[in-house]
Every structure is written in structure tokens, then in C-alpha cells.
Amino acid sequence: MSNVLLTRPSETVWQLTLNSGPDNRLRPDLLGELAAQLDVIEAEWRKAGGGETDPAKRGKHNGAGAVVLTSAFPKFFSNGLDPAVLMTLPNFFEDVFDPVIYRLMTFPLVTVAAVNGHAFAGGMILALACDFRIMNADKGMMCMNELLIGLPLPNSFASFLELRLAKPALRDTMLAKRWTQSELLAHGLIDGVAPPADVVARSIALGEQEGAKVGAGVWGEIKDGLLHAVIDASRSRREIVRPQAAAAKFLARIKRQQAKL
């Protein structure tokens, strides 16, 4: 069974539905399928005339295009990363996660996250990586819970959140605030709410509206210019210090200081 289902709800909108039960953990197989499906979408869009500099070559929809990203499960949009993967793949972020998420961030079509359930940690990053977010009005929260489980932020997460969030919202997010729909809307972290049955339809309508602007093919390059610090941070491979290592470093320093007394 596919982890990412591709459908075409309208002539200018492609839909990607995360289908890795029970909660769409962002494992390498799901991420690989997401990247592959984005390639399929871009190829179809370009074949239909999307990205042509000459308007006469853009087809009957003038190169319009959008992607709606949602979940097959009503409880979770995505519950983030799988701790087991982080234990077995030490360069998971730099080699697996970051390239796929950056591809989504800089996709040449408009992207809309139809957030129909909780989006936690990496799942919140996934939603924020899209250009727009429409959220379930009845249930679902967003949260970066690394503080509570003792995980430092990867370089890419730190850079991206600093770009996306205003300072008070960034502070509260790093303190593991569970953002409700009304709070997310007030801080500009989502673009609208809809009843559960209407989240995807509202997202498709938004994609049709905003996707009409991308025919010339520069939307992805514009985003790359704005967000390149994220992939630069990932490629820096700056050491991420875990709590145990930080404690050991501190205790070693105190021991050296005491030895000098």
C-alpha cells in the first residue's frame, strides 16, 4: 500500500494524501514517496505548459497549478518523526528529511496543507513548509514538543522556525506550546479554518485561486531565495548537542575548575 496517494481533484490541483497509519510518522519510506510524487506532479504541470515564459505556450489554464497536502486519518495530519529512525540514522535530517522538506518548501506550484488533525513536531514543520494552511476547526493542534522529550532542534528546524515565526510565537513554540486553531489563526500560522468535512475542499479552492499566479514558473525560485538559509543550515552539519553530552561537558568543566582551586 502506498504511503502517499496522488489524486487530481481539479484540472489545476493535485492532491497528496499521507496514508501511513496510524499517524503518518515521517519515516524514510514516506518521505521518499512524497519526493517521488512531487516529481510526478511537476512533470505533469510542465507537460501541460506550466513554467513556460511565453504565455502562449502555457495551455488553457495559463500554467496554473497547486498541490494540496492532507492526511487519510482524521486524528493526525502527522505525528512527526519516528524516534527509532533517529536512533538508527544519525544523519537522518541532513540526508533524508531536509532535502524532501526543502523540495516542498520551494515547490514551483502553490502548496496548501489541509491540516485535518494534529500536527506535532516534524508534522508541524511539514505543515509550515507549505505556502498556505487550512485547519480543521473542531479538533487538532500544532506543537513542537522537543523540549518535553529532551531532543535538541536540528539545524534546519531552528533556521526555518526563525524565518516563519514572529519572536513571541517562536518563544512559545520552543516552550512546547500546544497551539489551538484560534491561536494559530491569530498569530498568522494558519490561513483559515473549516469544518472537518470541508477542510480539503476549502484547501482545493484556495489552491485554484492562488495557483493561477504561478504559470511563469518563478514561484519556486522566489521561495528558494527567501528560504535558502534553511538548507544552508542543514548542510552546515553543525554538531547537535544532546542533553547527556551537554551535562557531561558541564561537569567536566566544573571538575577542571575545582582542580585549580
Image (cartoon, rainbow, N blue to C red):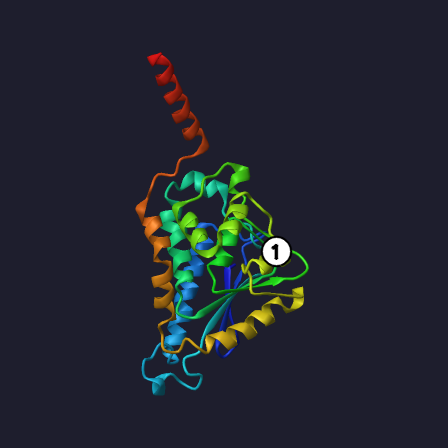
Viewer can see residue 144: no
Q: Which residue is mark 1?
A: 183
Residue 75, image x and y in percent? Answer: 63, 55
Residue at 32% from the left image edge and 80% from the top image edge: 53
Q: Amino acid at mark 1?
A: Glu
Residue at horizontal 39 percent and vertical 80 percent from the top? 48
Give residue 258's quadrant in the image.
top left
**152 shown above or below 9:** above
Residue at horizontal 37 percent and vertical 72 percent from the top: 43
Q: Position of residue 27 (x, y in %)?
A: 47, 50
Q: Secondary structure at mark 1?
A: helix
- Where residue 260 sits, quadrant-wise, is top left
Q: Which sits in the foreground, 198 or 172?
A: 172
Percent from the top left, x then y, of residue 28? 43, 51
The quarter of the image holding the C terminus is top left
Residue at position x 35%, y 17% in the image: 256
Q: Is residue 120 left or right of residue 59?
A: right
Please indicate, yes or no, whether residue 37 appears anywhere in the rendered image.
Answer: yes
- Mark 1 residue crowding within 10 angstroms, few (<14) / some (14–19) / many (20+): some
Relative to 96, is 132 above or below? below
Give above or below for 66 relative to 243: below
